[in-house]
Image (cartoon, rainbow, N blue to C red):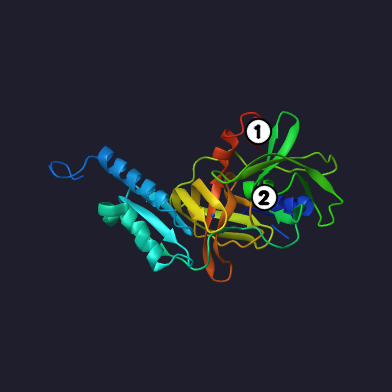
Amino acid sequence: MRTTRRTPRTTRRFRLLAATLGLLTATAVATPGAAAAPTRGTRAEQLSAVSTAILNAAVDGTAWYVDETAGQVVVTADSTVSKLSLARLMSAVGSDASSVAIRRVPGRFTPLVAAGDAIYGGQYRCSLGFNVVSGSTYYFLTAGHCGNVAPDWYTDVAHSNRIGPTVSSTFPGNDFALIRYDNSALSHPGGFTSAPDAYIGESVQRTGSTTGTHGGTVTGLNATVRYTDGGIVYGLIQTDVCAEPGDSGGPLFDGSLALGLTSGGSGDCTSGGTTFYQPVNKAISALPLYNVSVY
């Protein structure tokens, strides 16, 4: 297992990012030979059907992913999910209920947008994710639920120092946005490399404009989350790293590897929490028109 330790270079890079840009929140995450045992393909199909049934149950405040090793669909339910709602979810699964593992967490799953001071768009702020480039044009990635709320972004609450416009934004479904640097006076340091897929148990860190840098591990992949007030997002990285409102869009990384953009979650950095991240590689592949890459 790889471990993550921020080098002095990494620390300097994040200080420079914070000093140059602030970071973005709203001011206003078979047993062989056994005849009765299902084949691997059949089991995968069964778990996929269970996942679809959970989606169709439409219970807000839940997130789930397929744990192929355990042969289960792991459902995480926040504090807003009642026993009746969980019963409805399990009823939707039907005879495959034994394939579902339920975990409860405190708080409520919401996109992490809230009051504070960082990069501003309209009445909102979020956290800068990763700088990217296409030819001689520079951009940065952040959360789509941030990009959706403002056409332009600034380094200050007074909106006197403009960074540039939101050129692409997607939420729900995915959760990423692309912001272009139009202000030549702003630097846009790099230092990250193109992201591979995250893996279960990977040691990671994330940085946000509200809570700074915190670490933890990847606990789930390809997670679907139904936020209590923000729609459904698919294909997310699930972690036990804490985050708070205003950290949305911030980077999830393993050393110099760019992994994800903070989407949402529950809990806080005092008691801990569960957070979800839009994979960076999927965001970039969904932006063919701009042909950007992490640098």
Spot occupied by residue 250 in the image (x, y as percentages of width and height): 64, 52
Helix, strand or loop for disc 2: helix
Residue pointed to by mark 2? 146
CA distance separating discs 1 and 2: 19 Å
Q: Nearer the observer, disc 1 or disc 2?
A: 2
Q: Amino acid at mark 1?
A: Val
Residue pointed to by mark 1? 292
Which residue is located at x 45 percent, y 55 percent?
63
Q: Is residue 239 left or right of residue 251?
A: left
Give the vertical position of 32 relative to 88 (above or below). above
Count of numbered labels shown in the rendering: 2
Q: Is residue 287 left or right of residue 76?
A: right
Which residue is located at x 55 percent, y 43 percent?
174
Residue 82 lies in what quarter of the image? bottom left
Give the vertical position of 209 relative to 147 (above or below). below
State yes or no: discs 1 and 2 in contact (Cβ < 8 Å). Answer: no
Q: Amino acid at mark 2?
A: Cys
Which residue is located at x 63 percent, y 46 percent?
144
Q: Is residue 3 visible?
A: no
Give the vertical position of 134 relative to 185 (above or below). above
Which residue is located at x 70 percent, y 52 percent?
14
* Marks 1 and 2, the one that precedes in the sequence: 2
Spot occupied by residue 276 in the image (x, y as percentages of width and height): 53, 53
Q: Quadrant of the C terminus?
A: top right
The foreground one among 280 and 12 is 280
Q: Is residue 288 left or right of residue 69?
A: right
Q: Is residue 246 left or right of residue 272?
A: right
Spot occupied by residue 143 in the image (x, y as percentages of width and height): 63, 48
Give neighbour class at mark 1: few <14, some 14-19, many 20+ (Cα, 10 Å): many
